[in-house]
Image: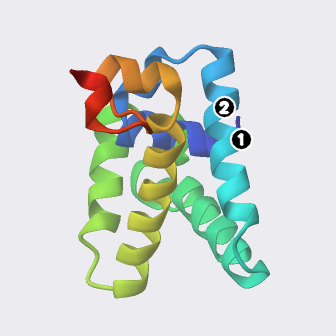
Amino acid sequence: MRPTLRAIAETVVPATSDLEADGWASLDRIVTNAIAARPQRMRRQIALFIRAIEWLPLLRYGQPFSKLNLHRRQRFLESLQDSPLLLIRRGFWGLRTLILMGYYTQAAALGIIGYRADPRGWSIRK
């Protein structure tokens, strides 16, 4: 998995730090498939936004995002989340949503959080 996206994922969903190689591959595949379904313009915007997340911290912390410690990564992402620019906030929340989807749609994560929904409905839980 790409180092920047992995660092973002570990910051947004700390439980991803416990994923093994197959879990990371699954998360990457889910996110990649979701992005691939978007228009070309949006895919370019997402790629540009991820690159910006990687390199903008260099100006403030002297290191790219993927090399920052957890506290600095959190602070940087919070600044994006709370940005006065709507486009930045939307970009962050969209990327965050992709990462949440990539993690919480995995069977292992569903078990960890106790999600027990079944396509057969409530009757199965009785």
Q: Could you say where residue 52 lies in the image, as x and y percent from the top left?
A: 57, 65
Q: Say above or below: 14 vs 73.
A: above
Q: Say above or below: 103 vs 95.
A: above
As shown in the figure, which amino acid type bears the numbered disc 2?
A: Ser
Side of 66 where 121 appears, left or right: left
Which residue is more in the foreground, 78 or 95?
A: 95
Q: Determine if residue 2 is in view.
A: no
As shown in the figure, which amino acid type bears the numbered disc 1?
A: Arg
Q: Determine if residue 22 is in view.
A: yes
Q: Secondary structure at mark 2?
A: helix
Q: Residues within 10 Å of mark 2 (few under 14, many from 20)?
A: some
Q: Residue at x 65, y 44 (%)?
A: 30
Q: Say above or below: 117 vs 63.
A: above
Q: Could you say where residue 75 lies in the image, as x and y percent from the top left?
A: 27, 50
C-alpha distance separating marks 2 and 1:
5 Å
Which residue is more in the foreground, 123 or 79?
A: 123
For the N terminus, the image quarter is top right
C-beta proximity under 8 Å, tags 2 and 1? yes
For the C terminus, the image quarter is top left
Res 74 label: none
Res 29 label: 1
According to the image, label 2 marks what residue? 26
Q: Could you say where residue 3 lies in the image, as x and y percent from the top left?
A: 64, 37
Q: Residue at x 25, y 23 (%)?
A: 125
Q: Could you say where residue 57 lies in the image, as x and y percent from the top left?
A: 46, 55
Q: Residue at x 51, y 62 (%)?
A: 56
Q: Secondary structure at mark 1?
A: helix
Q: Residues within 10 Å of mark 1 (few under 14, many from 20)?
A: some
Which residue is more in the foreground, 72 or 124?
A: 124
